[in-house]
């Protein structure tokens, strides 16, 4: 693939359709600038600021934009809240729709057949693949992103975090907890935060 | 189309295998594919629905045997050729054989960040009243279009409930094929697991898809 893509790139550059410097900026943006730390800030703000949480419920696109996260693949945001009764999980069975401005580009498993095929049929089985086991009475709500609406899961704030500030809370918010295939880290696990997905 | 991309409910792919500390890209060519796809899209101005159809409209064997960015490569070739921007002979030769065709713009490095942050909504104003309201019982239509659609097979002909109303949005079934945006009201429709999968379903599960108005009829 390496040779084929390099050949395609050289043709597109030679024809003047694409600017090599722009390609570098595109890669750098998605590799280093836009990622799940953005979403973690949204979640931590919602955990600490009830008016922001209300705004997320009413108009997630505007609320998220107010933190500076907007643009491609985040044009129409809906935030879905986990509660003690309901756990939300997001998928795109048809392709790979994912809220880029808050989570960055999706991981390979999100785009691959095992997740896309099975999470709508056997969500508990898929969550078990992630080591996540929910009480049997918890309702599971799966959101298949078939339009340009992009879903972000608002996980429940972990117990034992009373009085924590936003930055400290954001460190507990994993990417998977905002897709629904994981939970936030618990306060005691903060020391191993480097391993979070 | 009933393609291999429409994966919901298929069995046999094995467990999900999350990768610890996964990098954003796994090879340099994947970086290039992302950047080329976005930059070429800006140049040619094709829409997201046409891009999706270019990726999914292929032999299921090829779709399932390709990695994600391999499918992006195949999709981009299709779009470039369909728009007359490059020829198959040029791909084979690995170099340009003809002068360039006109493009809408060439994305410059200093425009990238602002362009990516720009909101380009898919919602459209409409004078048509919404046919359905939150809580209405509906049934998805049974249809088998050969072209692009965002009504997956696993929710065709199924009863559900309107959960969210999003306003009018560009209709992919039309927009993917150059037939115009044809905006329609868009709804999030919730389906009980049992209604989709029968007795094997987990009874605690609700699944939703986003459905344009023509995908729905009153139940």
Image: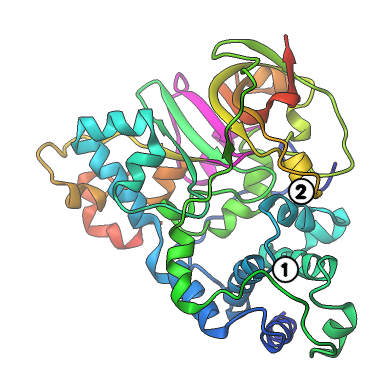
Q: Quadrant of the N terminus of chain A?
A: bottom right
Q: Which mark is residue B176?
A: 2
Looking at the image, the residue that sits furthest to the left is A163
Locate residue B189, reporting x and y percent. Answer: 61, 23
Residue sitting at x 86%, y 28%: B143
Q: Which segment did they paint magenta?
A: A121-149
Q: Is residue A125 magenta?
A: yes
Q: Nearer the viewer, residue B101 or B138?
A: B101
Q: Quadrant of the rendered structure where residue B161 is? A: top right
Asked if residue B21 can be seen in this view, the reply is no
Output the chain of dot 1: B
Q: Is residue A169 left or right of residue A164?
A: right
How far apart marks 2 and 1 lie (CA) works out to: 21 Å
Tell me which residue sits at (61%, 10%) in the image.
B136
In x, y percent, where is residue A68? 32, 53
Q: How many marks can you see?
A: 2
Which element is circle 1 on? helix
Horizontal and vertical percent position of residue B127: 62, 24
Which label lies toward us, 2 or 1? 2
Picture quadrant of residue A92? top right
Residue under circle 1? B70
Q: Nearer the viewer, residue A108 or B84?
A: B84
Whether residue B104 is in magenta: the answer is no
């Amino acid at each position: 693939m390496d040779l084929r893509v390099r050949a395609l790139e050289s043709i597109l550059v030679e024809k003047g359709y694409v600017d090599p410097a722009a390609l570098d900026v595109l890669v750098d943006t998605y590799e280093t600038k836009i990622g799940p730390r953005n979403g973690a800030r949204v979640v931590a703000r919602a955990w600490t600021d009830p008016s922001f949480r209300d705004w997320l419920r009413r108009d997630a696109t505007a609320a998220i934009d107010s933190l500076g996260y907007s643009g491609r693949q985040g044009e129409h945001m809906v935030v879905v809240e986990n509660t003690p009764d309901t756990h939300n999980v997001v998928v795109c069975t048809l392709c790979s729709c994912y809220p880029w401005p808050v989570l960055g580009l999706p991981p390979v498993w999100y785009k691959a057949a095992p997740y896309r095929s099975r999470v709508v049929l056997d969500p508990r089985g898929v969550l078990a693949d992630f080591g996540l086991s929910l009480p049997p009475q918890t309702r599971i709500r799966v959101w298949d992103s078939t339009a340009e609406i992009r879903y972000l899961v608002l996980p429940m704030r972990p117990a034992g975090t009373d009085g924590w500030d936003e930055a400290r809370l954001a460190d507990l918010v994993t990417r998977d907890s905002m897709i629904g295939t994981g939970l936030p880290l618990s306060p005691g696990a903060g020391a191993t935060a480097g391993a979070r997905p | 189309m009933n393609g291999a991309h429409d994966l919901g409910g298929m069995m046999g792919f094995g467990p999900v295998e999350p990768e610890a500390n996964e990098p954003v890209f796994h090879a340099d060519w994947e970086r290039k594919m992302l950047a080329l796809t976005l930059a070429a899209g800006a140049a040619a101005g094709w829409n997201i629905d046409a891009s999706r159809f270019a990726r999914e409209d292929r032999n299921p064997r090829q779709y399932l045997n390709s990695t994600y960015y391999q499918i992006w490569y195949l999709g981009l070739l299709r779009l470039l050729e369909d728009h007359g921007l490059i020829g198959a002979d040029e791909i084979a030769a690995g170099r340009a054989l003809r002068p360039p065709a006109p493009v809408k713009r060439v994305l410059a490095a200093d425009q990238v960040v602002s362009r990516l942050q720009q909101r380009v909504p898919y919602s459209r104003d409409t004078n048509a009243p919404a046919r359905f309201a939150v809580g209405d019982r509906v049934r998805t239509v049974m249809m088998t279009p050969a072209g692009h659609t965002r009504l997956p097979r696993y929710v065709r002909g199924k009863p559900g409930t309107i959960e969210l109303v999003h306003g009018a949005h560009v209709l992919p079934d039309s927009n993917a094929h150059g037939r115009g945006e044809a905006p329609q009201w868009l709804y999030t429709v919730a389906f009980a697991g049992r209604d989709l999968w029968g007795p094997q379903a987990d009874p605690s599960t609700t699944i939703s898809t986003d459905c344009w108005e023509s995908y729905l009829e009153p139940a």
